Amino acid sequence: GRMSDQTAALLRQQDDELSVLGKGVQRVKALAGVMRDELHEQEVILEKLEEDVERADSALGSMGKKMRTMVEEAKSSDRALWTTIGCLSLLLAFLVYLVLQ
């Protein structure tokens, strides 16, 4: 009688709570699937970004080497220019000395 009515009511309440809990678990599962997909997409994006950064780093390194080479060439050509000017100045001074004597 009374005990079985209470038991039946308690079982219905537990069934309802389990149903609500089951729906919550399904929502969490769906959310986990969305998060998994989003993380996969972000992984792909990060891999592409890493490749782009590596290419840019390589290009910058190459450009830096070229700039250093150009600076060294400019320094050596400046030295050669000043050496030539110095030699020509000495030659001019020597020729002026010869002419004036």
Image (tube, rainbow, N blue to C red):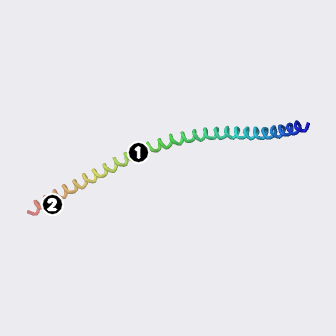
Percent position (x, y) of residue 55?
47, 41
Give the residue drawn at x 76%, y 39%.
Answer: 23
Give the residue drawn at x 20%, y 57%.
Answer: 86
**Left or right of 66 on screen, residue 37:** right
- Between 18 and 31, the one lying in front of the other is 18
- Between 21 and 31, the one lying in front of the other is 21
**Quarter of the figure with residue 16:** top right
Percent position (x, y) of residue 33?
67, 37
Identify the image quadrant of the C terminus. Answer: bottom left
Percent position (x, y) of residue 87?
18, 55
**Quarter of the figure with residue 31:** top right
Pick out the residue farthest to the right.
1
Q: Decide: few, some or many residues near mark 1? Use Cα within 10 Å; few <14, some 14-19, many ≥20.
A: few
Q: Amino acid at mark 2?
A: Ala
Q: Amino acid at mark 1?
A: Gly
Number of marks in picture: 2
Circle number at residue 93: 2
Residue 69 vs 88, above or below: the answer is above
Residue 28 vs 79, above or below: the answer is above
Which numbered disc, 2 or 1, marks the residue closer to the eye? 1
**Which residue does the numbered mark 1 point to in the structure image?**
61
- Between 9 and 15, the one lying in front of the other is 9
Give the residue drawn at x 76%, y 38%.
Answer: 22
Q: Decide: few, some or many residues near mark 2? Use Cα within 10 Å; few <14, some 14-19, many ≥20.
A: few
**Left or right of 77 on screen, residue 4:** right
Percent position (x, y) of residue 49?
53, 42
- Between 18 and 69, the one lying in front of the other is 18
Q: Secondary structure at mark 1?
A: helix
**Left or right of 65 on screen, residue 83:** left
Identify the image quadrant of the N terminus. Answer: top right
> Mark 2 to mark 1: distance in Å?
48 Å
**Quarter of the figure with residue 14:** top right
